[in-house]
Amino acid sequence: MSATYYGRRHLIRTVLAGAVLAVVATPSAVTAGEKPAATLYKNPQCGCCEEYATYLRQHGYRVTVKPTHDLSLINRQHDVPENLEGCHITLIDGYVVEGHVPVKTIDRLLTERPAIKGISLPGMPQGSPGMTGAKTAPFTIYEITNGTPRIYAVE
């Protein structure tokens, strides 16, 4: 066989290998844009919770808002300790997201998939997503587990 035959064969293999690598290494637009559904439970009168739902939607989450007067019951059903409660609870892809947690931390949670119940930004920190005012300090987001809460992220 001639050198031209082997040269073409090598070229074809190289092009095919590059094409396969490009397909495998590049995330598809559909996968990158898909976010799981979220159910947000909130007090019926709470406006900041609606703002938080809007914030999640702006970042690609499909949010269903469920007003309830039994938020503490829902927190207990999901084993959220009182000291980690926020003003709403969001259930996303098997995890509890308590309070005004930034999307960056939620995305990290859903990518890493740690063996925890969820995460919490307790209270209603000024400047957090959905809350008015300027952020005055880093947000400390805690893990929700059966044991002592540990810091999951600081933003």
Image (tube, helix red, strand yellow):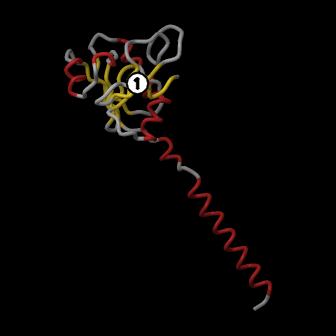
Left or right: 101 with respect to 93?
right
Viewport quadrant of the N terminus: bottom right
- Residue lying farthest right? 3
Identify the residue at horizontal 25%, vertical 22% (top origin): 75
**Image location (x, y in percent) of residue 19:** 63, 63
- SS label for mark 1: strand
Q: Nearer the viewer, residue 55 or 127?
A: 127
Q: Residues within 10 Å of mark 1 (few under 14, many from 20)?
A: many
Image vertical order of residue 5 relative to residue 20, above or below: below
Residue 56 position by quadrant: top left
Image vertical order of residue 117 relative to residue 142, above or below: below
Mark 1 highlights which residue?
142
Q: Nearer the viewer, residue 108 or 24?
A: 108
**Image location (x, y in percent) of residue 121:** 40, 20
Identify the residue at horizontal 26%, vertical 23% (top origin): 66
Image vertical order of residue 9 relative to residue 57, above or below: below
Identify the residue at horizontal 50%, vertical 7% (top origin): 133
Q: Nearer the viewer, residue 84 or 54?
A: 84
